[in-house]
Image (cartoon, coloured by chain):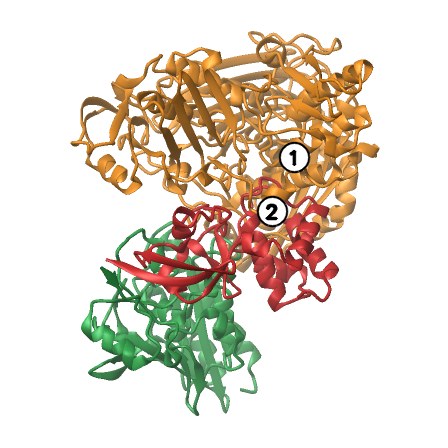
Chain colours: A orange, B green, C red
Amino acid sequence: MHQISQHVMKKDHREKIDGTALYVGDFTQQGALCARLVRSPHAHARIEAIHYPRFPEGYYKVDAADVPGENIVHVVEDDSPVFEADEVMFIGDPVAMIIGPDPALVDQLVAATVIDYRELPAILDIHDSDKVFFDYHYHKGDIDAAFAVADKIYEEDFQTPYQEQAYLETQGVIACFQDGQLTVHGSLQCPYYVQAAVIKACGLSAAQVRIQQDYTGGGFGGKEAFPSFIAAQAAVAAMKMPGKSVRLVFDRREDMEFTSKRHPSCCHYKAAVKDGQVTALDIQVLFNSGAFTTLSPVVLQRGIIAAPGVYNVPNLRVNGQALRTHTVPTGAYRGFGAPQTFFAIERLLDHIAADLGQEPIDFKLAHLVKQGDATSTSGLYHFPVPLPQMVAKVMAASDFRSKRTAWAQPQSGRVRKGIGIALWFHGAGFTGAGERDHIKAVVRLRKLADGSVEVLGSNTDIGQGIKTTFAKIVANELDLPLELVNYHNPDTALVPDSGPTVASRSLMTVGELFRRAAVQLKEQWQDGVEQVVEEHYHEPDFMLPFDLPTFHGDSYPTFAWGVAAVELGFDSLTGQNDILGCWACFDVGTPIDEQIVIGQMEGGVLQGLGYSAMEQMAYDSTGRIRNHSYSDYIIPCAADVPKLDVQLHVEEFPFGPYGAKGAGELPLVGIAPAFIAAAEQALATRGLNHIPLTAEESLAYLSAGQKELAK
Amino acid sequence: MVKANYMPTSLPEALGLMAEEELIPYAGGTDLMVSEAPGRDFLFLERIPELTQISQDDQYLHIGAAVTFRNILASDLTPALLREAAASIAAPAIRNTATLGGNIANASPKGDGALICWAADAQLVLAAASGQRTVDIADFYQGRGTTIRRADELLVEILLPKRWLAGASFCKVGARKALAISRVSFAGLFAAESGQIAHLAVALGAVADTVVRRPKIDAMLIGKTFSEAKAALPDYLQAWQAAIQPIRGRVSAEYRKLVCLNLIEDFLVERLSSAHNG
Amino acid sequence: MKTQLTLKLNGKTVNWEGDSSRKLLDVLRDDLGQVDVKCGCREGECGACSVLIDGLLVNSCMFAVGAVDGREVTTIEGYRDTDRFRALDKAFADVSAVQCGYCIPGMVLAAEALLAANPRPTDAEVRAAISGNLCRCTGYNAIVEAIVEASEEGEGLW
């Protein structure tokens, strides 16, 4: 492995472990105005009138009438308001905000605010949706011909649920408007996204709006777009009360109920098989976008690009829709559309293989893409595809074949076991031409007279370690001791826009810009003076330009690869499952810090295991999210899993720093299909086409099996 | 004006306070503190020696109502059944403060400590300044969240009969392996003497407004030989089938019922096939 | 009406008055400025607000402040100058067990509570001991490894 992969102490280790790192909630209420939102109790209704209570001195309302700029929170499309004025679109949709010094009194005033609503029909199920927000299509080959000559045709439906990011620190921002300058600091992934939203809502210029990231207690996508909403709301309030800090920090229930989560999906797959090979896939992907568009176009793009999985299927027709419902807007969550479609394709191939009497892993290996093959969007797999070696590693570590064979036999006794495996990729970096056309990242290095170097960009360390890995890259290129190179929580007044902290792009794309900037600085280095160098993003020349209307070209510069096996035991008396083992292998190129990467992989795997069965979130008949606390939305604790076995395989990417590729999202993406494959074996059934798998459902299969056995 | 912090150091002092003021007994607080209700007057029980000790006599294990689950786990006197249930409760930080008395008096049907007390036919000692009474645990509850405890009374002690605790079994079905509230819980006591079933007690948690214990059903098998019991098992299970009317919540009533029946059947089949020399 | 209490907070005697039924967490953070105690859920379900009371691990959100009268409360600030902390600090650094960091002060105190009672825990014992401290970042491998490493390297400290 590259010497840069050697682990160092993380740059932010000390202040996080000794409790001195300040997260936004740690700037306590003293001297600030507490802000609480007045939310819609209806999934869909017209606002007829708002009756505020009499406000004591120092307490105020803030609503659509107070928005100095446009009443819009800028995300991708501008369809969500800062505060609703006419119509509420989901339960929890903010109509107003109350601010004041005493939180208890603010709560009373929120409760005393009466809004007259006229209820309107609410659409909760995507199949009833009357509004298609986004509708994408692409195809390759001749799908109709392939189906016409097929030996056999398979058709299946798949469903995946909400997943809540469940970061340990809830969402929060603090805004202050003073001397014509608006400052917002908080828990966030993308300072310049927040700045753009605040500029639009407040009608200020970029020079007047300063966004600072505080230490951030986890994001996983949940703090990509959502902070723009609360920042806009707090900023509007701050402009109404110059000189005062407005503190909007969510409690856990509010956070779980009303912030964005992973898109629930329904996928319909139809496959043609000819001579034992899948020759065509006809795919329909539906994502529940909730009440607004938020990030759905990009989530859907990533989802449908991944729809055929890691398999070379010559004939494809893929349709994807993101639909409106009157439910909480969904958004970014680690994997960003891909976990939904990988679940579908992996399950489908497992089932086709079983029907053809083949072991699924052998069937999948016979369909794998390889370097030089066309991607789903008729781009190219430009670089080696190391999946066969990775599969071999995972199968050896898990003793896959012997377990798989043993548990295929009829089982008796209280515990029934199964093992499954899944394969996947994650497109590294922004989807399509986003990096080139929209982000246009800029980075800077400032070398001070004392020889130390400040690394300047807008990417945020939300736990994934970029304070450390960016500094390692620059220090390595400049031959400086690591303590002389530092990356701080970004402040838009001080750093250029190197783009958002999303899409597993920070290390690969921005890290490479820092490496190039360091090369530049080294060439110009003069002792004893301050120097600044800058680098700009250029799309690598090898890429086939991506065209969004036709979904044609290289959707990603390269891919990170994943393989995982999951072994489960089910209690035939209770239906509960026990995770007996999880073995995974990931290729994210060169790890810039091996331990940081392993930590990312392990954490992502556990989120994937949670997504498979334990984590359950649904809305009730009125559209209200039912699972809104840690006691009702269960995420794995330390006792739920054995040691996760994670290996790395390194396929260097020549255009990433030292060969690094995107990493953060990859490990979660394909865990669920491996889990469900194991469950199907243990429960002796076929056709588990949804997650989460509940104990109740498992017990039904086990009981049915029992009856079968008794006959 | 300054108000006292009610933290008595003896039982008479505590009962005197209970007689004079309307106080909420606080024995660990892990259920009480979930709600955000300022201004409550708590009577903190953890410094009362009589309430924080475990002792035994010939018949009973005496567990002070304010003994924490941590101390239950640490005591040599604790029977395996109670130890297993205590270890399944939440996580260490909760067990360090949560108490058996609190678990019982909170009157949730999901309490894992209370379940064991039901299965063992525990008796509860309630004390007031005016005197004390001892009641069967089954008579203590009036429904979910309500008990016969008067406002001036404290639950001071749990009397756990020792006789039948040896051959007991516990199973908790939670949403994860720790830090989970029971979705179904089961405790069973079984003892055989001279080839006959001498004692049988099944208790089910989290399926109704209180823990479910049906001595009449268990009596169907008591006094029977193992072969007689095996023959009577279908009727016994049928009686439970009719007796369990589960609540529905995050899991369905049907699921709760099926799991209960599975656990009861498994428990008896296992006991009846293994304990030939009882 | 206010109740007067005296407690020892990180070695210092603190006199406090107020509503004794308030959550210890709120008093620590809002009244006493002890923001090294993190707030994750306020209902005993995540462990981020863990503190030690007379050496025992407690969720400060599930503990009425009145119950700490006359007792000793230790937060990470009162623990970070000890050799035991240094052993855990080094071990957490060695395996990069700190990601977003929000669970970490509570996690370290959970580790201290474990090691004080059981100086050489197994993997499974560590997992049980930290089962009330949720972490969404790490998958727990590194945290478990760090605690085991500290128990080995910190020979004699516990």
Could you say where residue A485 lies in the image, as x and y percent from the top left?
A: 72, 29
Please state which of residues A442 and B170 is positioned toward the viewer in this rendering.
A442
How many marks overall?
2
Kindly report which numbered mark, 2 or 1, lies closer to the viewer in this rendering. 2
Front residue of B89 and A356: B89
Position above or below: C13 against A174:
below
Secondary structure of residue under mark 2: helix
According to the picture, the residue beneath numbered tag 1 turns out to be A465
Q: Position of residue A629 (x, y in %)?
A: 41, 45
The chain ID associated with circle 2 is A
Query: Where residue A124 appears, x then y in whole percent?
Result: 34, 29
Q: Is residue C130 visible?
A: no
Question: Considering only order in the chain, which callout, 1 or 2, is on the residue closer to the N terminus?
Answer: 2
Q: Quadrant of the N terminus of chain A?
A: top right
Nearer to the camera, A250 or A482 = A482
Is A434 located above or below residue A417 in the figure? Answer: above
Label 1 crowd bin: few (<14), some (14–19), many (20+), radius 10 Å: many
**B193 with respect to A648 (left or right):** left
The verdict on a common chain for dots 2 and 1 is yes
Which label was assigned to residue A17? 2
Left or right of A150? Residue A96 is left
Residue depicted at 40% across the width and 71% down the height: B100
Is A553 placed above or below A246 here? above
Residue B55 sits in which quadrant?
bottom left
